[in-house]
Amino acid sequence: MSARTLYGVIVDIHESLRRSGIEKLIVISGHGGNYVLMNVIQELNVNQRRVLFFPERESVETARRRSGCVTTASEDMHAGEWETSILLGVAPELVRDGWQDADHEANSRPDLLTTGLKAYTTSGVIGRPSAATAAKGVAILDSLADSFAARLEVLRA
């Protein structure tokens, strides 16, 4: 989906809900780096708290720390420790064999927005899936659930 379409979808959903009497919206994203989502939500919240984006950076960093992740969010960009751990924790059958040896480092990605992911990896991996464990995945999700409760209170206030 293009950035323009995503922006329009969120605005349209929010407006449709508002016309139906629903004033609050929560957008939960499983994809990192959602600049478009963060921007549209910030715009929708200019006059009042109406939309929550989750997980935001602080909740992700807290989950990384609590779960014992050894990589940073920047190092672990795609199919690395974070994502593989979550899948191992909730749906291990979705993790292809060979993940234990699929580490790929591309810590410097200055042209990512111009060239896309393919310029930095042929496998799709940027990170260390070898550091993933099911226990980390469960701990990540538990931490995110805790953080979500706190973020929800901000929206309710």
Image: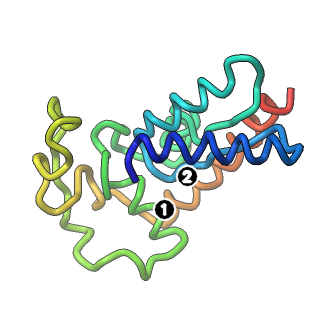
- Left or right: 114 with respect to 136? left
Q: What x and y, as percent, mark residue 20?
A: 85, 48
Question: In percent of the image, x 21 and y 59: which residue is there?
Answer: 124
Disc 1 residue type (three-letter): Ile
Question: In percent of the image, x 26 and y 50: which residue is there?
Answer: 127
> Between marks 2 and 1, how big is the CA–CA gap?
7 Å
- Left or right: 59 with respect to 148? left
**76 w.r.t. 86: above or below:** above
Is disc 2 placed on a helix, strand or loop? helix
Disc 2 residue type (three-letter): Ile
Q: Nearer the viewer, residue 112 or 59?
A: 112
In the rendered structure, are the residues bearing label 2 and label 1 in contact, judged by CB atoms less than 8 Å apart? yes
Is disc 1 placed on a helix, strand or loop? helix
Quadrant for the C terminus, please: top right
- Left or right: 144 with respect to 83? right
Residue 152, quarter of picture: top right
Nearer the N terminus, badge 2 or badge 1? 1
What's the colour scheme?
A: rainbow
Q: Check disc 2 and report the residue beneath it.
A: 140
Q: Nearer the viewer, residue 109 or 103?
A: 109
Q: Check disc 1 and report the residue beneath it.
A: 86
**19 w.r.t. 87: above or below:** above
Residue 41, quarter of picture: top right
Q: Nearer the viewer, residue 150 or 143?
A: 150
